[in-house]
Amino acid sequence: MTSGGTESILMAMKAARDRAKDERGVTEPQLLAPVSAHPAFAKAAHYLGLEHVQIPIDGNYKADLRETERLIGDRTAVVVGSCPNYPFGTADPIPEMAAMASERGISFHTDACLGGFLLPFYEKLGEPVPPFDFRVPGVTTISADVHKYGYATKGASIVTHRDGEHLKKYQRFLYDRWPGGLYLSFAMAGARPAAPIAAAWAILHYLGEEGYVKLAAQIRDAVKQIQAGIADIPELTVVGEPIMSVFAFTAAEGSGIDPFAVGDAMDQKGWCIDRQHGPNALHLMISPKHLSVVDAFLSDLRDAVKNHGPSQGKEIRYS
Ligand SMILES: Cc1ncc(COP(=O)(O)O)c(C=O)c1O
């Protein structure tokens, strides 16, 4: 267990880097991750001395396979796919990407920080779930956050390896030149807080599989209703094909609507909606609680689309 998605990702990237050096002699390692992957991968590259190479996304907001094939090479230490990514909630083509990595002896990481504690229960509900876990050959590590859809308090995530003996050893830090004795650590922190781990254990046991399935059904129902409501507003459209409860919506082609102006109007009604770009869009992450406010949300959204003013310029500018 680690303190969060970022630390799980850091540890998986460290393991991949050390494995590439040990098994393939890679001394100038690269980390290949789709543009839509979480900034934790850029951070990991920065901290760990990996070159961060971004894989462009295709028209469906998924990692472009031809570009992946073009970018993968002798220096690649790890290829990353998200299931799903945060901005669009789409799943990268993980079986194809993992196959490209594994046939070259390269590690493949599935970032299931968002999906890891929801998709298994979507699957139990009979919802379509793309392949992303160790059932996919070639996936070597997975990150999954208990402090997201596991409903634990912050500070609880897991990083798992396909193979405890062979691959997990690359995650460890072992130091034997200290008078204090042998030092072994598997995470960034040394002494670590037990409270978030205990809280995570408690919520897992409190909810149990039955509880998680019930909450997943509430999320699924809220998502279906909100997306149907957005589909009924001709000026708006959902971006790509999100697989679960995280998605973006934007102006429908030719509608002339400014999504950020709609966001501003929603702010004034008391909603709090993230803005993002590429395309300019509003972003939602649905939790079970939202099922009780779907009608109010859609009514305010319809009104915001009809009666919004000019955008207050909350657009984030990148230099
Ligand atoms: C897909 C994905 N991966 C990784 C992370 C990083 O998780 P954390 O904020 O727990 O470090 C996030 C956070 O939102 C995420 O959405």
Image (spheres, grey):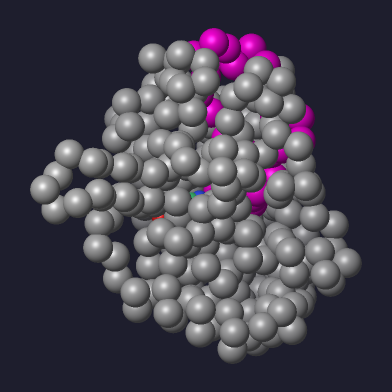
**Which residue is drawn at the image coordinates 42% and 73% (left, top)?**
197
Total of numbered circles in the picture? Answer: 0
Side of 18 relative to 133 (left or right): left
**Which residue is drawn at the image coordinates 57% and 12% (left, top)?**
73
Q: Position of residue 270 (x, y in %)?
A: 44, 77
| In front of the other: 231 or 185 | 185
User: Residue 77: within the magenta?
Assistant: yes
Q: Position of residue 299 (x, y in %)?
A: 65, 77
**Which residue is drawn at the image coordinates 59% and 16% (left, top)?**
72
The answer to whether residue 211 is above or below residue 181 is below
User: Outermost residue toward the right?
Assistant: 126
Residue 222 visible, this angle:
no
* Image quadrant where residue 289 sits: bottom right
User: Outermost residue toward the left?
Assistant: 179
Q: Quadrant of the C terminus?
A: top left
The answer to whether residue 291 is above or below residue 193 is below
- What is the span of residues highlighted in magenta in the rendered image? 68-97
The answer to whether residue 258 is above or below residue 105 is below
Q: Quadrant of the N terminus?
A: bottom left
| In front of the other: 111 or 55 | 111
| In front of the other: 234 or 56 | 56
**Which residue is drawn at the image coordinates 62% and 44% (left, top)?**
163
| In front of the other: 223 or 17 | 17
The answer to whether residue 153 is above or below residue 85 is below
User: Residue 185: within the magenta?
Assistant: no
Residue 117 visible, this angle:
yes
Q: Position of residue 233 (x, y in %)?
A: 73, 61
Q: Position of residue 69 (x, y in %)?
A: 67, 16
